[in-house]
């Protein structure tokens, strides 16, 4: 059996696997944080759109109520 550089050392293999693992974990975490950020932005945009639609609907209802109040006021003025 040869004791030269051609032999595979189990310690070197384990150390290489551990080092690669330490390098992959931060990359994996960055990818997870990025995906979570993108999903959060998407949900925020959806909430904003829903709130805009609700605001529009409420403003429409207020406008309709103001119109009704105006009609009632004019009817009351005619009665006086």
Image: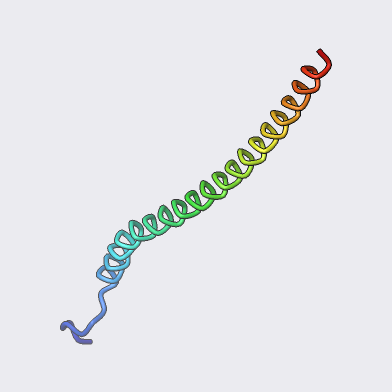
Q: Nearer the viewer, residue 10 or 24?
A: 24
Residue furthest out toward the top: 80
Color theme of the render: rainbow
User: Is 69 placed left or right of 1 in the picture?
Assistant: right
Residue drawn at point x = 36 percent, y = 58 percent:
25
Task: Give the left or right position of residue 67, taking residue 78 as reference.
Answer: left
Quick check: 68 above or below 23? above
Q: Position of residue 58 (x, y in %)?
A: 66, 35
Q: Does residue 53 lie above or below 76 as drawn?
A: below
Q: Residue at x 46, y 55 (%)?
A: 38
**Quadrant of the rendered image containing residue 74:** top right
Residue 75 at x, y = what percent? 80, 22
In this view, which residue lies farthest toward the bottom?
Answer: 1
The residue at the far right in this view is: 79
Q: Is residue 3 above or below residue 55?
A: below
| Residue 30 place in picture, x, y as percent | 36, 56
Depth check: 23 or 64 in front? 64
Would residue 69 appear left or right of 38 to someone viewing this image? right
The percent position of residue 26, horizontal first and vertical second, equals 33, 56
Q: Nearer the viewer, residue 71 or 54?
A: 71
Where's the C terminus, which quadrant? top right
Task: Point out the image quarter for the N terminus.
Answer: bottom left
Residue that appears at 67% across and 40% down: 57
1 or 71: which is nearer to us?
71
- 48 displayed left or right of 37: right
Q: Give the mark count.
A: 0
When asked about the image quadrant of residue 56, the answer is top right
User: Going 61% across and 38% down the picture, which residue do you hit?
Assistant: 55
- Toward which corner of the image does residue 73 lie, by quadrant? top right
């Amino acid at each position: 059996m040869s004791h030269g550089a051609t032999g595979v050392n189990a310690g070197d293999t384990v150390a290489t696997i551990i080092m690669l693992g330490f390098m992959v974990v931060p990359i994996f975490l960055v990818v997870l944080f990025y995906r979570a950020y993108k999903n959060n932005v998407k949900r925020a945009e959806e909430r904003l759109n829903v709130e805009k639609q609700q605001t529009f609907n409420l403003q429409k209802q207020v406008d309709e109520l103001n119109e009704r109040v105006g009609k009632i006021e004019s009817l009351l003025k005619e009665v006086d």
